[in-house]
Image (cartoon, grey):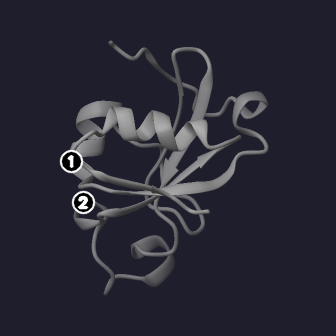
Amino acid sequence: MSKKIERVDGQWNKTDGTSLKGHLTASYAEIVSVLGQPTHPVEKIDAHWSFEVNGEVVVTLYNWKNGRVYNGPKAPPVEKLKSWNIGGHDSKAVKAVSELFPTSNVYSSN
């Protein structure tokens, strides 16, 4: 079954209240191939994607404090990161990411 992915970057009415629900281990290139380019870096995040799957499940996918934005030039560039956080309103976000990245390691933070 095909998943409809709609980017919701900047749509705070959809992403407000999301929180850490799980983790994804995948290459930056793999994520970009599925979701497209990330939003611009902010504070402690080098790459961030906000999207909705099938008009039902809101997901935020981002790195947290493991890249150059937070740690400076000695940290790996975003293209080398493999550890990503999955945010959402509930555990459906983790399930949605596991379906979008079936060959990657996806696990719940609970």
Question: Circle 1 — which element?
Answer: helix
Query: Is residue 32 toward the left or the right of residue 21 in the image?
Result: left
Q: Characterize the local packing of mark 2: few (<14), some (14-19) or many (20 or more) Cα atoms within 10 angstroms.
A: few
Q: Which residue is rendered at x = 24% and y = 59% of the image?
A: 79
Indicate the position of residue 3 as horizontal and vertical percent values. Answer: 39, 17
The residue type indicated by label 1 comes to Ala
72 shown above or below 81: below
Query: Is residue 41 toward the left or the right of residue 43 in the image?
Result: left
Q: Quadrant of residue 73?
A: bottom left
Query: Which one is nearer the viewer's eye here, 33 or 96?
Result: 96
Answer yes or no: is residue 21 visible: yes
What is the spatial separation of the Cα atoms under label 2 and label 1, in whole angstroms?
A: 7 Å
**How many dots with numbers?**
2
Label 2 sits on residue: 79
Q: Which part of the image, by quadrant, shows the N terminus?
A: top left
Q: Earlier in the sequence, mark 2 or mark 1?
A: 1
Q: Characterize the local packing of mark 1: few (<14), some (14-19) or many (20 or more) Cα atoms within 10 angstroms.
A: some
Indicate the position of residue 96 as horizontal and vertical percent values. Answer: 47, 33
Label 1 near label 2: C-beta < 8 Å?
yes
The residue type indicated by label 2 comes to Glu
Mark drawn on residue 29? 1
Q: Residue furthest front?
A: 110
